[in-house]
Amino acid sequence: MKKTVGHVSVETFVHATEATEKVLAALAPLALPPEAATLEESTGHHGNPIVVVHALVTRSRDIAAFFSSPFVSAVRQELSETLDARLDEKGMLFVRADKQDLYRG
C-alpha cells in the first residue's frame, strides 16, 4: 500500500538563552508558510521561560514546498530510506532536525 504524506508537523523549543527571531529564521530552510507557525509560552522544569513553536502544514502545495525545500534536499536519501518509519497511519510525517544545523544552513 502506498502511503501519502497528509500533514507535516514541526515543533521546536526556544529556550531563555535563545532569540526567538533566530530560531524562526533557522526554520526557513524548511519552506514552511509563515502562517503555519504558532508560538506558545511555557515554563521549563526549573521555572525557565520556554517558547514552543508549532507548525502544522496540511495544504498539498505547502507540503510540496516542504519536500522541495533545501532541508529535504539535503536529507532526501535518508528520508527515502526511512519513510515508512516516519509516516503514521494518518499520513503525519515525523522528522527531527537540529536547530543549530538549520541555522548554519
Image: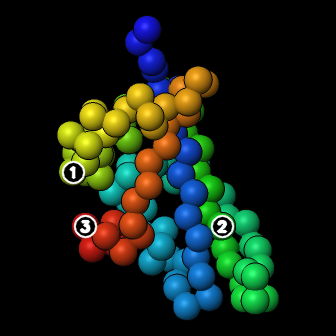
Q: Is residue 63 above or below residue 12?
A: above
Location of residue 69 with respect to 39 vertically, above or below: above
Which marked residue is nearer to the observer: mark 3 or mark 1? 1
Residue appearing at x 73%, y 66% in the figure: 40
Q: Are marks 3 and 1 in contact (CB under 8 Å)?
A: no
Mark sitting on residue 52? 2
Q: CA distance from mark 3 to mark 2?
A: 22 Å
Specify few, some or many for label 1: CA neighbours under 10 Å numbering under 14, 14-19, or 20 or more: few
Determine which quarter of the picture holds residue 26: bottom left
Query: Counting other residues with Cα less than 10 Å from the Cα at mark 2, is it few (<14), some (14-19), or many (20 or more)?
Result: some
Residue under label 1, please give it: 74
Q: Residue 81 location in percent, x, y?
A: 27, 34
Residue 3 on image: x %, y %: 45, 18
Which amino acid, mark 2?
Answer: Val
Residue type highlighted by circle 3: Gly
Q: What residue does disc 3 label? A: 105
Q: Which amino acid type corresponds to the residue marked 1 in the rendered image?
A: Ala
Quadrant of the drawing holding the C terminus: bottom left
Is any atom of residue 37 visible in this view?
no
